[in-house]
Image: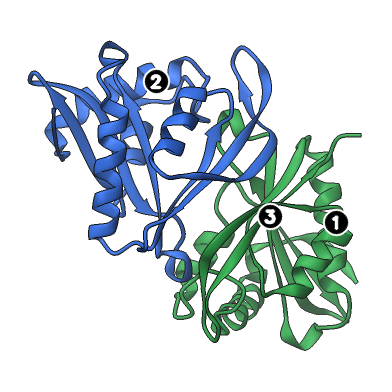
Chain colours: A green, B blue
Amino acid sequence: MILRPATTSDEEDIWAIFRAVIATGDTYVFDPAMSRAEALAYWFRPENHVHVAEHDGQIVGTYLLKPNQPALGAHVANAAFMVAASARGLGVGRRMGEHCLAEARRLGFRAMQFNFVVSTNEKAVRLWQQLGFEIVGRLPGAFRHAQRGFVDAYVMFQSLEK
Amino acid sequence: MILRPATTSDEEDIWAIFRAVIATGDTYVFDPAMSRAEALAYWFRPENHVHVAEHDGQIVGTYLLKPNQPALGAHVANAAFMVAASARGLGVGRRMGEHCLAEARRLGFRAMQFNFVVSTNEKAVRLWQQLGFEIVGRLPGAFRHAQRGFVDAYVMFQSLEK
């Protein structure tokens, strides 16, 4: 698996992954009917560092890394990850998570924060905990899950300092 | 004290308050050198409900109310408050907080969340607790305070359902 910065020529593959991920309404807050243009504008905002994961010449995942807040909060990174359904079980999420943490350290971020990890997305919660994140907050009923109704979301955090 | 929706004719007064509040670098993450245009664009984003507080014909405070997340998280409100230094002690923050909570209920929000309350801003933390918010998360060192260096920020939350 190769991880590399995304280019505009990856847009079609990224949109295919993005669309499939939000369609299920069980992990991200985005409207499942979000347009291609809105999705790509969100993923490629000027302040975002976007990477893709390639496996056998196919793009199987993408992540973005950015400051979680402006100026006086910009030392804390935020990130988001999406994996192609066809690539589940290959460890794409873990590889991207590790790469993203290294990239955040390289860019000088002091910590990384996830603002909204859906509590019922247990695989993701477990993966982030394995990669060093702690649940530092619980948001009661903050996510309207397509199947389960209102469920909690977690705020997760990890210091990147030695 | 009167609370009413803001109009474009309030921009100058809102900017004067905004500029003074961010100048101290002890409560908001915004760059103290943020421009008027950036500040007003942020405060008057299309999804924001903006109000001002008037006292003796002067604008002494302003708040914004908006969904904290898109679509599947849009039932939780977010809000931000700024009070003119000249009006400290008049209870402007409390009046705006109560008005904002009533407005959020009226608009059908199920809860309200503050993503980033600076822990050293003790007056604000106490006021929000008095108005029913709980600290549901702690973000270690997430705010670079102009005088104190890295200090914690809190995530605060309140259900608006009976």
- In the drawing, what numbered circle is on residue A99? 1
State which chain disc 3 sits on: A
Above or below — where is A158 with respect to A42? above
**Amino acid type at image mark 3:** Ala
What is the crowding at mark 1: few (fewer than 14 residues within 10 Å), some, or many (at least 20)? some
Q: Residue at x 17, y 39 (%)?
A: B6
Residue under pointer 2 = B21
Q: Could you tell which of marks 1 and 3 lies nearer the N-terminus?
A: 3
Q: Which one is in front in this view, the residue at disc 1 or the one at disc 3?
A: 3
Residue under pointer 3 = A79
Q: CA distance from mark 3 to mark 2?
A: 29 Å
Above or below — where is B98 with respect to B53? below
| Quadrant (top left/top right/bottom left/bottom right) for the N terminus of chain B | top left
Q: Which one is in front in this view, the residue at disc 2 or the one at disc 1?
A: 2
Pick the front one: A118 or B95 = B95
Give the quarter of the image for residue B51.
top left
**In the image, are marks 3 and 2 on the same chain?**
no
- In the drawing, what numbered circle is on residue B84? none
**Amino acid type at image mark 1:** His
**In the image, are marks 2 and 1 on the same chain?**
no
Residue B14 in the image, given as x and y percentages of width and height: 25, 27
